[in-house]
Image: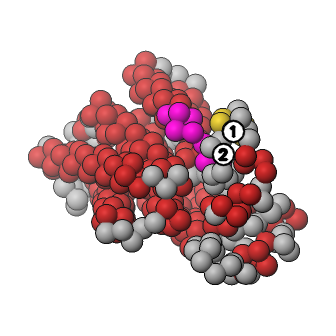
Amino acid sequence: MAELAIDPHAAPAAAAPEHGEHHDVHATSTGLSNNKMAMWLFLGSECLLFGGLISTYMLYRGRHPKNLGPDQIYDIPFTSVSSFVLLMSSLTMVLAVSSAHRKDLRRMDLWLTVTALLGATFVGGQVYEFTSFYREGLGYTTSLFGSSFYTLTGFHGVHVSLGIVMLMAVVGISRRGRLTGDRAEVVELVGLYWHFVDIVWILIFTLVYLIPS
Amino acid sequence: MSTTTDHADHSEHADRSHPEHDDPAMLVDGAHVIPGEHHGTHSDAFYVQIAVVLAVITAVEVLLSYTVDGPLFLPALLILMTIKFFMVVLFFMHLKFDSKWFSFFFYAGLFLAVGVYLAFLATFKFFVSS
């Protein structure tokens, strides 16, 4: 843990910004951004939430009627395209963060909007998938497989939807001129959340869709 | 390890205090770093390269799920999944270049989840072939 020792020179530098400079510098006991630290703690706790949902699905994926199991209803090509869309949204998100650090607000807005659109495409695909599964006879209470599948992917979909709301909120704030280049951390925090949603889908895509029951 | 706040590095003052940022040819792990920028912020081309690698790995995963059927299928998919996971965490989320505290918070949650749920699945005999 010696690696994690606080740099004694960090706090004074952060604690005494000159007036009019370092708009985002806050005095913290660690010298780190409290907002960023809170976001990483939140994401660490989210690992436990999705870990529980994924392992519950793994446990129940074999509990289904004969014709309504994962091997019968999953549409791998369709889900692969959805996964690709979400993966590319991570690229556009990191480009938005990069633009924010360069204080290029026009491009930042553009990439954030593209990220939100890609996210909306993914959610749209999920709604289509849920609808087609329901039409095939797999309801939420049809089987333990159905319940655990809808709960896991539904929770993920809600996270993506919340991410889209955050992205559009940042774009709105930026358009009103309240997000200056110095406040790139706001975009970075939304980016961390968005990338987390992406890495959860990386796990779900392989563990739920690609590995047969 | 320095835990100097990242905000300070955004300002011109902070950039002048880090002369290595003045070198436009500066490399971090083989990738160009934009001079005067936040630690670990790479050129857009670097991020595109990472995204291309991620897309290729995804394509390989899908291909494997259709073509490979044997003892190597599961380990291969799990390894590819892990590579994708850490590529996003390390490069897109900048954890490789950020404070070790952030890594500690995230990995603590991640490894706690992995440990707890592996134990949970083992308790319900998930790994016992019937």
Please state which of residues B21 and B71 is positioned toward the viewer in this rendering. Answer: B21
For disc 1, the neighbor class at 10 Å (few under 14, some 14 to 19, many from 20) is few
**Residue beneath the point at 53% across and 65% down:** A182
Q: Which mark, by number, is residue B24? A: 1
What label does residue A20 carry, if any? none
Residue at 67% over, 67% down: B8
Q: Quadrant of residue B99?
A: bottom right
Q: Which residue is mark 2?
A: B35
The picture places residue A210, in percent across and down from the top left corner, at: 41, 35
The picture places residue B18, in percent across and down from the top left corner, at 77, 55
Q: Secondary structure at mark 2?
A: loop
- Which stretch did the figure color magenta? B40-48
Q: Residue A58, how many percent across, how many down?
A: 45, 50
Vertical order, B128 against A54 (above or below): above
Q: Give the amino acid type for the residue marked by disc 1 in the picture.
A: Pro
Q: Residue at x 22, y 61 (%)?
A: A141
Q: Is residue A47 magenta?
A: no
Single out the residue that lies furthest toward the front: A20
Describe residue B68's horizontal placement relative to residue A4 as left or right.
left
Front-lying residue, A138 or A156: A156
Q: Nearer the viewer, residue A3 or B69?
A: A3
Q: Residue at x 66, y 45 (%)?
A: B35
Is disc 2 surrounded by few (<14), some (14 to 19) or many (20+) residues within 10 Å? some
Residue B11 position within the rendered picture, expressed as x and y whole percent measured from the top left: 64, 63
Q: Chain of mark 2?
A: B
